[in-house]
Image: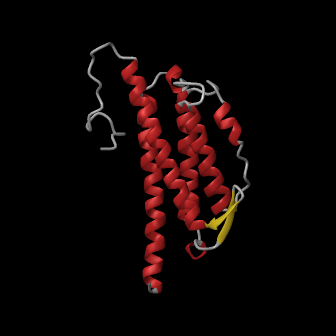
Amino acid sequence: MSSMDSDRFKAEFIEYAIAKLRENCTKIRDCVGRLSEEQVWERASWDENAAGNLLLHLQGNVRQWIGSGVAGLLDVRDRPAEFSADRSKPKGELVTFLESTVEEMCGQLATVDQDLLMQSIEVQNRTLSRLRAIFHVVEHFSYHTGQIVYITKNLVARHQAPGAPINFDRQSFKADFA
């Protein structure tokens, strides 16, 4: 790969990572908007996460991996608190907190020195390149976005009147993954 091709690849990679994080935030906002305050914290069983926990988890993950790992900011993550929280924040605050963190981290990505993408960093006791860390964040974020979509569809269906149609067509539900 020529130097120019390598530079284009790095720029395209960063642009796409930023776009996917923002796209998934839009899907999450749409899903959470369909849930009541109670549903955001509802768990199907004791060993499953509520949508609210996943929002806290995504915020912590993106801040740790991009903020601390890629950009070198202080790591302030409290991972156990992400999963133990229960009705601790209203849904609007959760979404705003996640979106503001994602925007801040997208700003970090937009200014990352692309020559350092292959440089090794350490995150969660793992050594990997900055490029792999960014890839991990986007993949992880997308995975949990899918979980939030699934949770939302199940909760909306369960709380509707029996026989009522579930309105998840492409026009009305931005989080449709079809």
Using residue 99 as the reference point, say whether residue 78 is left or right of it.
Answer: right
Quadrant into which the N terminus falls: bottom left
Query: Quadrant location of residue 171?
Result: top left
State the colouring used for the structure image: secondary structure
Total tally of numbered discs in the picture: 0
Using residue 77 as the reference point, say whether residue 159 is left or right of it.
Answer: left
For the point 41% across and 35% down, the residue is 30
12 is higher (above) or lower (below) than 79: below
Relative image position of residue 25 (x, y in whole percent): 46, 44
The furthest residue to the top? 161
Relative image position of residue 7 (x, y in whole percent): 47, 78
Using residue 108 as the reference point, say whether residue 22 is left or right of it.
Answer: left
For the point 59% across and 60% down, the residue is 108
For the point 56% across and 37% down, the residue is 54
Relative image position of residue 56 (x, y in whole percent): 60, 38
Quadrant into which the C terminus falls: top left
128 is higher (above) or lower (below) than 34: below
Relative image position of residue 68 (x, y in whole percent): 68, 57
- In terms of depth relative to the viewer, which is nearer, 61 or 163? 163
For the point 58% across and 54% down, the residue is 105
- In terms of depth relative to the viewer, which is nearer, 70 or 110? 70
